Image (tube, rainbow, N blue to C red):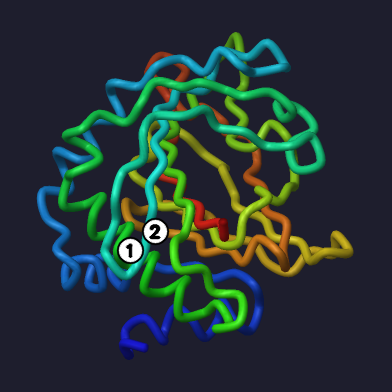
Amino acid sequence: MDPSLSELAAPLSLDGFAFVHAPRLRSILESAGLRDWESFASSWDDLGVDTFMADGGRYRRRRFAAFAASARGIERKPHQPHYQSRDYNALNGGVARWFSPVTDAVAAHPAMTAILATCHRLFDALTPEATRPPVWHVEVHQFRIETGPEQQGLPTPEGMHRDGVDWVMVVLVRRENIASGETQMEDVAHRPVGSFTLTEPLDAALVDDERVFHGVTALRRLDPEKPAYRDVLVVTFRRG
């Protein structure tokens, strides 16, 4: 494994999660081709409202895409619904949820391709050879969680959860006029094992989904007169 990725793999293997500070991740991603982060981040201003919120909320905006990751590289799949069983998402699971697709420009952006290629190298190497698939199913979510006086923004309205995948990366894109949004980790017995807050663009959380539950606390608006939101990119890798 590349020595730079070994720095990420060590805590992930030990604890089941890792907090990666922005300078470290930026360095790794730049070696994988990251450039023009600003135009990538600006695409979060063009997300559709998530209409599948069982709590009636309209505080979440998103776009979605699926990819295949293999030795041949990263290939986008035809647009498809996002599905989670209610075992993993008691609030919004159990239905096929169709979201606006990630645009072609964003899917092909050098920031996206660098992130997906890096995830593939890391997660593939961390997976035992006996269970390592030739092709990974990859899902990408652009999320914006808004918060205001009429409705509180909940990054994980389902609470502490697992996603029903193998590996997860959450990359902060932007925080605007908010406090809180603390990422919390629990082991499979629901004992707290760590917490941190993504504050700088390219701060990231890495998660072994089979070993830990994760959640994010509600957002609090700082200036009541200004928009307040949290933008993240979520990437999941699943066998088969």
For the residue pair 223 and 97, the one nearer the viewer reads as 97
Disc 1 marks a residue whose amino acid type is Ala
Give the x, y percent position of residue 152.
62, 21
Say above or below: 62 vs 182. above
* Point 44% across, 33% down: residue: 143
Which one is in front, 229 or 165?
165
For residue 215, side relative to residue 72 (left or right): right
In the rendered image of this protein, does residue 202 appear above or below residue 156?
Answer: below
Residue labelled with disc 2 = 203
* Percent of width and height locating residue 50: 52, 18
- Does the residue at mark 1 contact the one at mark 2 (Cβ under 8 Å)? yes
Determine the CA span between mark 1 and mark 2.
4 Å
Q: Which numbered marker is on residue 66? A: none
Q: Is residue 184 above or below residue 120?
A: above
Q: Secondary structure at mark 1?
A: helix
Viewed as shown, does residue 49 lie left or right of 112?
right
For disc 1, the marked residue is 22
Q: Is residue 103 left or right of residue 122?
A: left
The image quadrant of residue 218 is top right
Q: Secondary structure at mark 2?
A: loop
Residue type at the position of mark 2: Asp
